[in-house]
Image: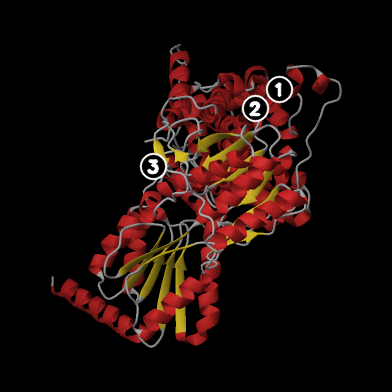
Amino acid sequence: MDFGSINPILLLASLMVAATPLLLAAIGELVVERAGVLNLGVEGMMITGAICGFAIAVNTGSPIVGLVAAAAGGAALSLLFAVLTQFALANQVASGLSLTLFGLGLSALLGQGYQGIKPPPFPRVDIPLLSDIPVLGPILFRHDIVVYFGLALVAAVWWVLKNTRAGLILRAVGENHDAAHALGYKVVRIRILAIMFGGACAGLGGAYISLIRVPQWTEGMTAGIGWIALALVVFASWKPWRVMLGAYLFGGITVLQLNLQAAGVAIPVEYLAMSPYLITILVLVIMSADKSRAPAALGRSFHASQ
Amino acid sequence: MKFTKLLATAAIALGLAGTAMAQDKTKVGFVYVGPVGDGGWTYEHNQGRLAVEEHFGDAVETVFVESVPEGPDAERVMTQMALDGASLIFTTSFGYMDPTINVAKKFPDVKFEHATGYKRADNVSTYSARFYEGRAIQGHIAGKMTESNIVGYIGSYPIPEVIRGINSAFIHARKANPDVQFKIVWAYTWFDPAKEADAAKVLIEQGADVILQHTDSTAPQAAAQSAGNVITFGQASDMSEYAPRPRVSSIIDNWAPYYIARTQAVIDGTWESTDTWDGIGPGMVGIGEITDAVPEDVKAEALALKDAIANGEYHPFTGPLNKQDGSAWLADGETADDGTLLGMNFYVEGIEGDIPQ
């Protein structure tokens, strides 16, 4: 056993990388659910974003264009869900589940011929001066741009939901769509926009895995992150900062358990492997003991005539 | 009731007709654990399949199913292949062992070939390659090349095949460099690029400057490349797209000659249940080009080691060797027998950590 070989600075730095896909997908789903829509298709949108981003990045040679394409791909797939649930008034749970299955199949089809290819490398931003600060520099200021984008997105979502008129309307739609409709807000239009935002975020999260974290394309490579994102939103009581905490906790313990293994800690590997899930759930359950609750209209269909 | 009976009869008749028609061409099935584009293990099995197609031309038809999970799904896939008239089925992963035996019982006329397992039957052969011979050469290069004296090893599952590789690499790394240490991470997967990449990054963060992998994707190679000063070895396939650095050499599985010989045996009706375990000498294990990133003298030593193993002068498990707990295993000059190697469930002396049970 040799804890000395675990470098805490590198551990914290890789924590931020490991948490980013989860953070992006979860913050998108949070906005969707605050608008009163339950989209269980996060995994499907992530994997679709992963292959869209990968394919476009390989073909154009630009990882940035790839990321944009990934967001577009995720949003396009979520539009399918929006049509089913907002116009056809289909059951949201069933539509979301089928979206995941559809996304996994579609991505495998699109991915034919992209296996074993190297994507163009993603530029790493070394923020001058800041990245040279001892300890904090390597942890905080030597990442790729998407890591910072994820953080900025959390802050933006929090601010918009709490302090702006648009956020108020979105929450009103999620809490009581009949009242929002009576006040003259376009419930369906607002929900479609929220669903597309969630799809774009999930797609971006998927592309982060295929373009930056691995970087490679393989079928089913998101490996259940979308489901964890869904659970995270619930356990975080639909609050942006708690989503971030949960994502970092999960990412951190995932990386830590590999570190402990490599350091030869005598805990059976199976316990280490399940620890990220257990600890994340435990912490967030304890935190959600306050009075927060789900958006009142979550999962309910809306039609102006009803 | 009558209607379903009629349908069932029709289905059986169709099935029989299908089998009868397939007799003209010998149908050979392959069950893969990963996608054919993994660039490693499954890729090489698929190269073997393509070689069979090329060798026999129209006389043989091959079918394959990729990314088949080890477990009940595998049994379904094999049953379907047998029902579709395959007369020879290669099941190419350790975890297919029991499914292969189960399905083989139901289809006594179909020949099965299971890779890397140890259970045989009248219509089930096993075959594997002595990858540990290649691991010895990797271990030597790793021991000579490491500057941090820490070698990272990404294990898949704690099965004899993988433990044998770890031991062989460690013995030869220690011979080349008495200070070398191994850090071992178990990924519990054969193929999961995200997990393999994470494991490689963790090992690099903990000071490893050589990464050996017993998983099938090229993700650890990519991780090593972005880390910079780290070397790796291609696993199962050459992975030459990462040469000359980080990939400095590789173990290449060459299944084509075996697959062609076994298919020929089925066509001739001379197929018998056998146990094949070939190494560098017969060519089932190839050593990929050692790149210029390796110093000349180390390269020469590695090649000499390869030749000595190939012509049988040297066995990678030659005593004196102790087990991890310090108890004697092989006396001076004694070599390990195949039975011990096939069931290997212990580390040799000097490796730290426990094998997960």
Residue at far top of view: A290
Q: Nearer the viewer, residue A53 or B158?
A: B158
Residue A86 vertical placement versus A130 (above, below): below
Cβ atoms under marks 1 and 2 closer than 8 Å: yes
Q: Nearer the viewer, residue B77 or A86?
A: B77
The residues bearing labels 2 and 3 have C-alpha atoms spaced at a distance of: 37 Å
Q: Is residue B143 left or right of residue B45?
A: right
The residues bearing labels 3 and 1 have C-alpha atoms spaced at a distance of: 40 Å
Callouts 1 and 2 on one subunit:
yes
Q: Is residue B96 left or right of residue A153?
A: left
Question: Based on the displayed image, in which of its 4 quarters is residue B225 positioned?
Answer: top right
Q: Given the image, what chain letter belongs to the residue carrying mark 2?
A: A
- Image mark for residue B345: 3
How many numbered markers are drawn? 3
Report the mark closest to the observer, 2 or 3: 3
Q: Earlier in the sequence, mark 1 or mark 2?
A: 2
Q: Amino acid at mark 3?
A: Asn
Q: Position of residue A125 (x, y in %)?
A: 80, 32
Task: Please say whether residue A110 is visible from this viewpoint.
Answer: no
- At 41% from the left and 71% from the top, the residue drawn is B29
Q: Nearer the viewer, residue B122 or A301?
A: B122
- Image mark for residue A139: 1
Q: Given the image, what chain letter belongs to the residue carrying mark 1?
A: A
Badge 1 local density, few (<14 within 10 Å), some, or many (20+)? Answer: many
Q: Nearer the viewer, residue B338 or B270?
A: B338
